Image: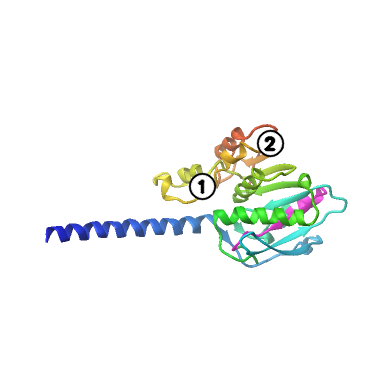
Amino acid sequence: MATLKSTLQVLLLFLIVGAVFVFLRYFEKRSLFYPSKVIEFLPEESGLDFEDIFFRTSDNLQLNGWFIPSPSAKFTILFCHGNAGNISHRLEKINFFHQLGCNVFIFDYRGYGLSKGSSSEKGLYLDAKAAYDYLLSRSMQENQIIGYGESLGSAAIIDLACRHRLYALMVEGAFSSGKDMSRNIYPFLPYWVFSIRFDSESKIKSIKVPKLIIHSLNDEIVPYALAHKLYEAAPPPKEFLQIRGGA
């Protein structure tokens, strides 16, 4: 009888631990990705011509993006947006790059906007690579592409830049790693319970192209120290731009 009771207690403990583990993984994904399916604004509403693009990833998912051309542009910004909303919420930054005389290609990750699938870290990297390949399919040269990533998008564009050639790399609101972020947000939980890695700190060490890291002292999501840690890990040439206000 005692043996049966002990067995049931162990089984109950495993069930509780398993349930907590599943909940944490679910919570992790829900707290990291905030996709919006509704396209609320179009570039034409800001006076910008654009092409509505559909392209496929290596695992055969259809993604949606916008290509905003600029007359006589020498470079194209490959824009990896942050974790909330979708491409329709980035018109201000799209317009900024357009005014600099650059083409802009911004796309939605799987699960965002009109893109199919469900969000994940691996999917984020595959989506950035698919967007890069799409630009190459337009007869664009690698040294004509400038990577830009904001917040979560910084992890996507850094992963791309450590594997494929770009002319330059810009990140804004970037963080050093998922491990550092989890320690900052959930200091009471061991890091191993999370599946997300986003190890930009290690990846940026192999990126030789010019790098610009932008971070606000007032960023309420990503600590300033984590952006500076990423900067310290990066080899030259590199610049750190400290700003104030919302990113």
Q: Which residue is mark 1?
A: 197
> Would residue 173 appear left or right of 18 to someone viewing this image?
right
Residue type at the position of mark 2: Lys
Inspect the magenta stretch and tell me whether residue 98 lies in it. yes
Q: Can you give x and y, in whole percent of width and height, for residue 56 in the image?
A: 67, 62
Quadrant position of the N terminus in the picture: bottom left
Colour pattern of the rendering:
rainbow
The picture quadrant where one finds residue 230 is top right
Q: Is residue 83 visible?
A: no
Please tell me the numbered disc located at residue 208.
Answer: 2
Q: Is residue 159 visible?
A: yes
Q: Secondary structure at mark 1?
A: loop
Please tell me the numbered disc located at residue 51.
Answer: none
Q: Residue furthest right?
A: 72
Q: Secondary structure at mark 2?
A: loop
- How crowded is the residue under tag 2: few (<14 C-alpha within 10 Å), some, or many (20+)? some
**5 and 100: which is toward the camera:** 5
Measured Cα–Cα span from mark 1 to mark 2: 22 Å
| Nearest to N terminus: mark 1 or mark 2 | 1
The picture quadrant where one finds residue 242 is top right
Residue type at the position of mark 1: Arg
Q: Can you give x and y, in whole percent of width and height, for residue 2 in the image?
A: 12, 58
> Would residue 82 appear left or right of 133 to someone viewing this image?
left
- Is residue 149 depicted above or below 40 in this figure? above
**Segment colored magenta:** 94-111
In percent of the image, x 64 and y 56: which residue is there?
A: 127
